[in-house]
Amino acid sequence: MPTADEVRQFAAAATGSSRTTHEAQIRVKRIYEPAAPDDGYRILVDRLWPRGMSKADTALDEWMKAIAPSPELRKAYAHRMERYAEFSASYLRELNTSPECAVLADRIRELALERPVTLLFAAKDPVYNHANVLRRWLIE
């Protein structure tokens, strides 16, 4: 009997789309939360190292600084919720126009075909942050 993940992968392959697999396999999580076995491959997607965290504390597999928002965009947003829609649109423009981000996105999607991938971020807000924008972009 195939597992649920195998069925999703088969269905995605049959339809020519891996969106379902990516949607199930790519997650977001604050880096300050403890690592869990079901996190799979853990990728820090912040440009700056999280305050108060040692590398040993993160159980990190990879740090993809280049896929994070530019320093200019990060400073302009300053985690103000009233600017989130504008920030999201600007960040999506950065993601869509960066060849380096395209390469990193392909890598994340390939990893997600094999196992869960957790995008780690340090922002305090679990909803209004760049990791959620990145996740939506990756699964579309």
Image: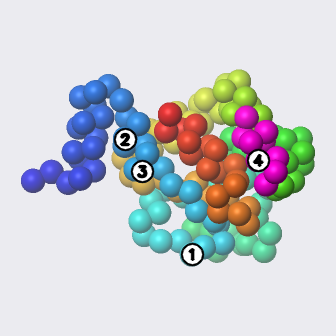
User: What residue is shown with label 1?
Assistant: 34
Measured from the top left, where is residue 76 in percent x and y?
A: 90, 45
Under mark 3, the amino acid is Gln
Please tell me whether residue 69 belongs to the stretch shown in magenta: no
User: What residue is shown with label 4?
Assistant: 84
Tag 4 secondary structure: helix
Tag 1 secondary structure: loop
Measured from the top left, where is residue 20 in percent x and y?
A: 37, 41
Q: Given contact means CB atoms under 8 Å apart, are the residues at marks 4 and 2 in contact?
A: no
**Structural distance between the alpha carbons of marks 1 and 4:** 27 Å
Q: Earlier in the sequence, mark 3 or mark 1?
A: 3
Measured from the top left, where is residue 44 in percent x and y?
A: 64, 55
Q: Nearer the viewer, mark 1 or mark 2?
A: 2
The residue depicted at 82 percent of the width and 51 percent of the height is 82
Q: Is residue 113 above or below residue 96?
A: below
Q: Earlier in the sequence, mark 1 or mark 2?
A: 2
Q: Nearer the viewer, mark 1 or mark 4?
A: 4
Q: Is residue 115 above or below residue 39?
A: above
User: What residue is shown with label 3?
Assistant: 25
**Structural distance between the alpha carbons of marks 3 and 4:** 25 Å
User: What residue is shown with label 2?
Assistant: 20
Regarding residue 69, the answer to whether it shows in the image is no
Q: Earlier in the sequence, mark 4 or mark 2?
A: 2
Prevailing SS of the magenta stretch: helix
Under mark 4, the amino acid is Tyr
Q: Earlier in the sequence, mark 3 or mark 4?
A: 3
Q: Nearer the viewer, mark 3 or mark 4?
A: 4
Q: Give 127 or 75, whichever is nearer the viewer.
A: 127
- Stretch of the chain drawn in magenta: 81-89
